[in-house]
Amino acid sequence: MDCQGISCGAAREVNGGGAVVWPGSAAAERLRIRGGPEQIAGILRAEIVRGEIMSGAMLPPVTELMERFAVSRPTLGAAFRILEADGLVTVLPGRNGGPQARLPDLVVASRHVGLYLQVQETSVEDLLEAQAESEPICARYLAKRCSVAGLSELRRCVDDQRAIVAAGIRTGADFAKWVSCVAEFHALLCSNCGNKTLAAQAGALRDVLDAHRRIGIREHTRPGVDLPLDFIDQALGYHDRLTELVSARDGEGAERHWREYLEFVTTAEDRSRDISVTISLFE
């Protein structure tokens, strides 16, 4: 048999009728995806992530994809639902709607990580321990790699905290505003550290950390419970000092300082509530 310059072993993927199927051909792709929606989703997922289908672009028409993969409309719909769950496709309604590609983000991963940790009955103490180990490393890289714009954002965030404190934290709403500002500082620290893996790891814990902060707000704003004003003043001092260490490019000092701060936070949390309880993403 003439294999046209390709080894016959490579070319001879034979279907049930005994016909030769050439690598790269439409027939070869149809044979490759006999497993169903998961395989179709895998192929389209790779094309979106590699940029072959751009974010914001509509996927090819359903009839075209049905022809390409030799599958039914329900099978293709199941593949779309898998991609929706991955956060890689949004199905737009209407006559001109259909599946639209989107870039992956950490929102989906964060939600899944949070649910997994809750199912595993992970404690608040466990979460704080992980944060106390990972964020100081981010602080070290932050001091060495932070851009001018990133440092400016950190300083702006500290100034926002200072303004909230100066205005007086008297109500639950005031305290919640301060907590939100502190959360932003932690996010800026990780996102500007110059290491994408560490930043993604921190981002993946976002839902869990947000839930933890909501619980903290609720605990500290119950009737008869004093707001932790001394803690707030000290935390502001730690944040301000970190920006100084980042400005000085003192990576080792920034890591030591942030580790000390997170140990201070854990001790304060342990005094104010039971940190052995399981985290909860739900009110």
Image (spheres, helix red, strand yellow):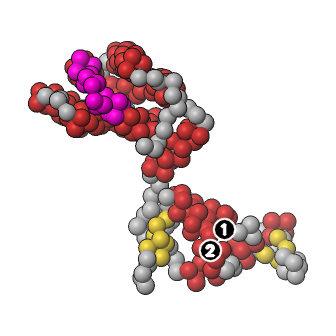
The percent coordinates of residue 131 (x first, y second) are 45, 27
- Per the rendering, the mark at residue 54 is none
Query: In the current view of this chain or complex, which residue is farthest to the left?
Result: 167
Residue placed most toward the observer, 270 or 86: 270
Q: CA distance from mark 1 to mark 2?
A: 6 Å
Q: Say which element carries label 2.
A: helix
Q: Which residue is mark 1?
A: 37
Q: Residue at x 44, y 62 (%)?
A: 102
The percent coordinates of residue 5 (x first, y second) are 77, 70
Residue placed most toward the observer, 3 or 116: 116
Above or below 66: residue 243: above
Q: Is residue 21 left or right of residue 271?
A: right
Label 2 packing within 10 angstroms: few (<14), some (14-19), many (20+): many
Q: Which residues are magenta?
A: 216-232
Q: Are marks 1 and 2 in contact (CB under 8 Å)?
A: yes
Q: Which residue is mark 2?
A: 76
Residue placed most toward the observer, 261 or 146: 261
The percent coordinates of residue 177 (x first, y second) are 23, 37
